[in-house]
Structure formats: C-alpha cells, structure tokens
C-alpha cells in the first residue's frame, strides 16, 4: 500500500521532528531570502518599467474626465450595465466555487485522501502525479462548468455568441486538455525535483519555472492558439498594403497580419499581439474586417503596433518569469512547513533523500512531504491562491500598458476622432462595462474602459492642437 501516512506505524509520526526541522533550517532561510529578493526585483521592475503616465506632457485645459454620458446613448449605457450585472453572477459564483473546491481539497486532508484512494494501486510516482493532475484539474473544471454554461447563455441572450452548444462544449474540453498538458509538464518536473533534492529543489524549480514561463509564452501562438482558431494571412489588397505601410512607417518589422476565424464563436471585435521573437504575430478577428471601416481598423492595428514596438509581450513574460521564480521559493517554504503539511494530511518532509536500502525496506520513505504525489492537492491550492493574489497586480500593469498602446496609436495615426469613434464602436459591439466597480476592475479589467480611452483621445487632441472629438451622442 502506497498510502504511507495513513499508516499509524509511519516512522515520521514517531521520529523526533527536531532533527527534520534542523535539516531544513538552512535551505528554508536561503529560500526565504531568495523569495524576498525576487519579489523585490519584480516590484522594482514593475515600478520602473510600467508606463504610469502613458500620455506624457501637460494637457491644455486639463485632463478630460472619463464619462460615458456624452458619448454613449442612455440605451447603450443601460444595456452595458444590464449585461455586466447579468454576467457578474456566474462569474463570481464560478470563481468562488472553484476556489472553495481547490482550497478545500488542498488545505484539509480531503484532497490527499482522495488522491490516495485513486492511486492506491499505482506504484510509479510519475503515473500518480499524472492521475492527481488530471483528477484535480478536471474536478475544478467540472464544478466551474455550470457557471460557464450560465455565462455562455447570457452571451447568447445578448447576441454575442455565435456558437452551438456542441461547439461551445468542445471548446471547454479543449481548454481542459490544454490545462492537463501544461500542468502535467510543470508538476511532473516539480515532483521529480522534490523527490531527487528534498531540501534544495527550490533552486532548480525556480530556474525551471522561469524557463517554462518564457517557453510557454513563446510557444503559445503556435501551439495553443491553433487549437481554438484557424488563422490565415490578411489577403492582398488595399487594407493589407495600408497596414503593412503603416507598420513600416512605424519602424516595426511586421511581415504579415493574421486573421482569426473568431466569427465562428463570437460577434465581438478584437485584435491582439502574441508571442515574441520569431513567434510574434499581430492577429485581427475576422469580425473586425467585416464590420469596421478601414480607418478604424488602422487605428486598432496602430494600437497593436504599439505593443509590438514596445515588446510588451516579452516584457510581461519576463516579469512573469521573475514572479514565478519568487513564487516557487515561497511554495518551498509552504510545502516544507510541517504544520501546513499536517493540515493537508501529509507527513513532514524527509531530512534527506532516502538511500536505496532504506527505500527497499520501507517504500513509503520516498513519499514524505511534498515528494508524495498526494501533496498535489496542497500544491494546486497554493498555486490557485497565488494566481488570485497576482491577478490584480497583472491587471493594474496591463491597463497602463494598454493605455500606452493607445497613445502609440494616436501618435501614429494622428486621428483622435477615428480613434474615439472606434473605441465607441468596440465598447458597444462588445457590450463592455463602461463603469466597472472597484472589485470588477481588480479582478477582470486588463484594459482601460471605453470612456477612459475616449478621454485619452481628447487629451491627445488638446495636446496636439487638433480638433477635439465632439460628444459622440447628440442628446
Ligand atoms: Zn492592446
């Protein structure tokens, strides 16, 4: 039986805990210092490189206050608020339910017990890690599913979704598959390191986390995006020529603009940049091409060129890599805490890697602390908690980087009127929240709001003595 800690004769219960705590004193101190240094580095990099003032310079007559009223009709404002209100329910309930399940399994013995039972007959640890990964991620996926379907039904009510339920469910399954693969790679490497280097795995894991974050961001456009969408080059013609000309003028080496077949899923409008180096790509939704005027599409692509020119994806990836390394050091401190392990139904970690003879005598010695694949429930709970904490920071930085790309678009096109009407159309077509509350902003807002973006167009016009976009709605 591999369920070691359920055995009351488990030597970890009787061994003096002092010896083990002693073995971990030095590596834990080192990991704590490394975590502090890495998080401080993240904070400094964020503080120094985030464009806190995306449109530098003084605005004659002062900054324009973001306000939906002059630019959105009462019907548009009402519709956006109603949509936001409707979507909030499934979104918050989904978040809370998933967290309750993941944290409940990880911070109590329930998760370890579940995994122990499911892998009782599985001897090889990699297989136990795979089973644990698949079971825990699928369980989270499963409890989220009703709320995801609820959200999708609201998108449908508002005419944003063009998918059949079969198509939608296939997408959900594909997402789960992507989660399985990414978590399986990361967790197999992690548990492998923990088993091989019980006291110093955090050094290798921190370096590995950096590499994995960079590799994932690089590979994402060519390995993950094609799972969900088909892409083709923007066909030859005036639009393509204009966009590539604009990129050349801007000094951004862009050889192609890709079109995603988003219309098979949504009516919403979007464009984005992903990848870096040889995988970098500018993608526009096909919905954009069929419904927007050429000048507005140019304004959008000018924003994307801003991301490309500033290497925003690479920059964000490097911050993410640094943060992931810090996160791993913190994870080590928590996964070697006897108190937390006990709470999760796990034994204390081994003081050193058990020798072959020792393991032959008692196979359970290889499964101490987080070396035991059953500890994955606790590991995933800690990862979920970390993701929840870093989300608002990431959104805060993202909103400023997006505002800088907006400023770039205004500088490149020098056409605040087109920019403002384009932002209005984006907000209305995507039914974007015009005035999110503080919690929504923290949790979900990675872009400035439509009214904020239109206000920036007016600021830009004032600064450059160009005609300021008039109110877009005539009351
Ligand atoms: Zn952007």
Image: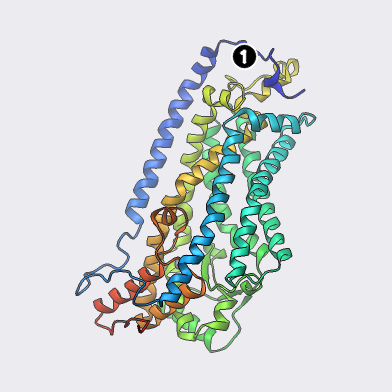
Is residue 285 found left or right of 358 in the rendered image?
left
- Figure disc tally: 1
> Looking at the image, is 465 positioned above or below residue 10?
below
Which quadrant holds the N terminus? Answer: top right
Is residue 39 found left or right of 223 in the rendered image?
left
Is residue 140 visible to the viewer in this orientation of the structure?
Answer: yes
The residue tagged 1 is 13
Query: Looking at the image, which residue sits at the far right?
Result: 121
Q: Residue at x 47, y 83 (%)?
A: 245
Query: Looking at the image, which residue sits at the far left?
Result: 61
Is residue 126 found left or right of 392 in the rendered image?
right
Q: Residue at x 45, y 75 (%)?
A: 76
Q: Residues within 10 Å of mark 1 (few under 14, many from 20)?
A: few
Q: How is the image coloured?
A: rainbow
Viewer-proximal residue among 297 and 117: 117
Viewer-proximal residue among 277 and 60: 60
> Looking at the image, is 128 positioned above or below residue 227?
above
Viewer-proximal residue among 195 and 128: 128
Viewer-proximal residue among 322 and 135: 135
Which picture quadrant has residue 248?
bottom left
Task: Give percent across and percent down for residue 401.
Answer: 40, 62
Ligand 1 falls in quadrant: bottom left
Is residue 159 found left or right of 24 in the rendered image?
right
């Amino acid at each position: 039986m591999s369920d070691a800690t359920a055995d009351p004769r488990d030597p970890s219960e009787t061994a003096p805990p002092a010896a083990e705590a002693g073995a971990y004193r030095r590596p834990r101190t080192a990991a704590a210092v490394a975590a502090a240094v890495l998080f401080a580095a993240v904070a400094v990099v964020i503080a120094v490189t985030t464009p806190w003032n995306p449109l530098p310079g003084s605005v004659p007559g002062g900054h324009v206050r973001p306000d939906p009223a002059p630019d959105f009709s009462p019907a548009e404002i009402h519709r956006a608020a109603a949509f936001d209100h409707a979507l909030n329910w499934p979104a918050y309930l989904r978040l809370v339910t998933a967290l309750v399940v993941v944290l409940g399994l990880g911070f109590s013995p329930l998760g370890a017990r579940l995994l122990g039972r499911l892998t009782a007959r599985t001897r090889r640890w990699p297989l136990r890690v795979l089973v644990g990964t698949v079971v825990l991620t699928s369980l989270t996926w499963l409890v989220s599913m009703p709320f995801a379907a609820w959200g999708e039904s609201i998108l449908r009510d508002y005419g944003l979704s063009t998918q059949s339920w079969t198509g939608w469910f296939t997408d959900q399954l594909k997402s789960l598959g992507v989660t399985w693969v990414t978590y399986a790679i990361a967790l197999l490497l992690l548990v492998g390191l923990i088993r091989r280097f019980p006291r110093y795995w955090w050094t290798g894991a921190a370096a590995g986390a950096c590499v994995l974050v960079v590799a994932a961001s690089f590979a994402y456009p060519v390995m993950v995006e094609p799972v969900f969408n088909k892409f083709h080059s923007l066909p030859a013609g005036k639009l393509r020529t204009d966009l590539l000309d604009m990129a050349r003028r801007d000094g951004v080496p862009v050889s192609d603009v890709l079109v995603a077949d988003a219309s098979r899923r949504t009516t919403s409008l979007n464009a984005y940049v992903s990848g870096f180096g040889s995988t970098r790509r500018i993608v526009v939704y096909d919905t954009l091409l069929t419904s927007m005027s050429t000048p507005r599409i140019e304004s959008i692509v000018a924003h994307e060129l801003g991301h490309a020119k500033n290497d925003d994806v690479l920059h964000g990836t490097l911050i993410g890599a640094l943060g992931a390394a810090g996160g791993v050091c913190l994870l080590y401190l928590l996964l070697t805490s006897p108190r937390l392990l006990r709470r999760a139904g796990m034994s204390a970690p081994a003081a050193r890697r058990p020798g072959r003879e020792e393991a032959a005598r008692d196979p359970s010695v290889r499964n101490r602390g987080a070396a035991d694949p059953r500890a994955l429930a606790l590991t995933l709970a800690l990862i979920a908690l970390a993701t929840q904490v870093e989300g608002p920071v990431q959104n805060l930085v993202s909103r400023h980087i997006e505002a800088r790309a907006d400023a770039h678009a205004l500088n490149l096109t020098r056409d605040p009127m087109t920019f403002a009407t384009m932002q209005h159309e984006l907000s209305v077509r995507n039914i974007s929240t015009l005035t999110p509350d503080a919690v929504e902003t923290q949790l979900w807002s990675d872009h400035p709001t439509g009214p904020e973006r239109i206000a920036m167009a007016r600021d830009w016009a004032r600064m450059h003595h160009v005609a300021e976009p008039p109110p877009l709605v005539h009351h």
